[in-house]
Amino acid sequence: MKTRITELIGIRYPILQGGMAWVASHPLAIAVSKAGGLGVIAGGSAPADVIEKEIDALRQATDAPFGLNIMLLSPFAKDLVQLAIDKKVPVVTTGAGNPAPFIEDMKAAGIKVIPVVPSVALAVRMQRYGADAVVFEGTEAGGHIGELTTMAALPQVVDAVDIPVVAAGGIADARGLAAAFCLGAQGVQMGTRLLATEEVRLHPNYVDRVLKAKDRDAIVSGRSTGHPVRALKNRFQLHYIEREKQGASTEELEALGAGRLRAAVVDGDVENGSVMAGQVAGLVKEVLPVAQIFEDMVAGAETVLAAAQTKWDV
């Protein structure tokens, strides 16, 4: 399958892996890249020496293209940009901040720069700064989110920029991939579906919680702080939302949320930790190898699009 995204970054399938903190480590990124997508190592708030080991481990396993996600609010963001340049990382995706000060240097080093954006205005701005493509992430996604939905905003982003657009938020199967193409995307980014894979390093309790999720389980907290987060409903999420309603300060809420993602991902505390996942968690019903998920999605999308054409031809 060829699209502008596959041609841009040299991958077989137009599928990028989301840079999920505490989850997107080298084992998952290796599996995604070997399966023909773009595996991504999450920089998170980790220092450069930790991420360098992740990059080295990935390169020992495959020579396929991969990416590094840099969270620009991280105190180590500048170090990670320099690491990406020094290690000749093929692709950098960015979030939680403005990558403009770093784009020129990264592109000069041959890096493809793909910021994650929540709106048309930011997509246009990233194109102006020199981004090679953008990921538009709808509010259906897990983790830190914007307010616009994928269905409504994705075609607006596509119409507003000339660079390739990747769709994210609410995509977990062949139907989602086909829909993204119909809305003008050149590829998709997935996170939630990849939480239930054979290759991911994730506590079994977390995976089990995703597999049992229903359509209304992925709820949003943190709106009062200006940094909303979507995660599966549990004791922590409900308590956090209740404290928001009671008028808790931003400082108190930040303290309340500290370490909660690690508690769920590493320790398996899925009641008192933050089980970040998107609204498509309700579609995830079994643990599969990454390669099978991708093959099923691509073949299935072709079937979905062919069936849609048949309906129109009647």
Image: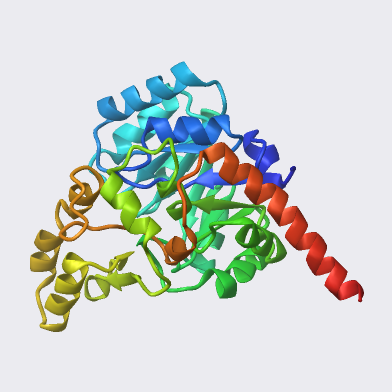
In the rendered view, would you say 314 is above or below 279?
A: below
In the rendered view, would you say 67 is above or below 135?
A: above
In the rendered view, would you say 269 is above or below 226?
A: above
**Which is nearer the eye, 232 or 106?**
232
Q: Identify the image quadrant of residue 157.
A: bottom right
Residue 11: x %, y % from top left: 64, 35
Q: Is residue 312 left or right of residue 137?
A: right
Residue 244: x %, y % from top left: 16, 77
Residue 3: x %, y % from top left: 72, 46
In the rendered view, would you say 118 is above or below 293?
A: below
Q: Is residue 213 left or right of residue 266?
A: right
**Which is nearer the eye, 109 or 199?**
199
Q: For the point 62% across and 71% down, which residue is it?
A: 156
Q: Is residue 162 left or right of residue 132?
A: right
Q: For the point 80% across and 65% down, which residue is it?
A: 307
Q: From the image, which quarter does the C terminus lie in?
A: bottom right
Look at the image and tell me whether residue 160 can be seen: yes
Q: From the image, which quarter does the N terminus lie in?
A: top right
**Which is nearer the eye, 16 or 106?**
16
Q: For the point 47% across and 57% down, which residue is it?
A: 284
Q: Is residue 306 left or right of residue 233?
A: right
Residue 196: x %, y % from top left: 42, 48
Q: For the point 24% across and 33% down, which residue is it?
A: 47
**Which is nearer the eye, 60 or 299?**
299
Residue extending farthest bottom? 246
Q: How is the image coloured?
A: rainbow
**Total label count?**
0
Look at the image and tell me whether residue 107 can be seen: no
Residue extending farthest right? 314
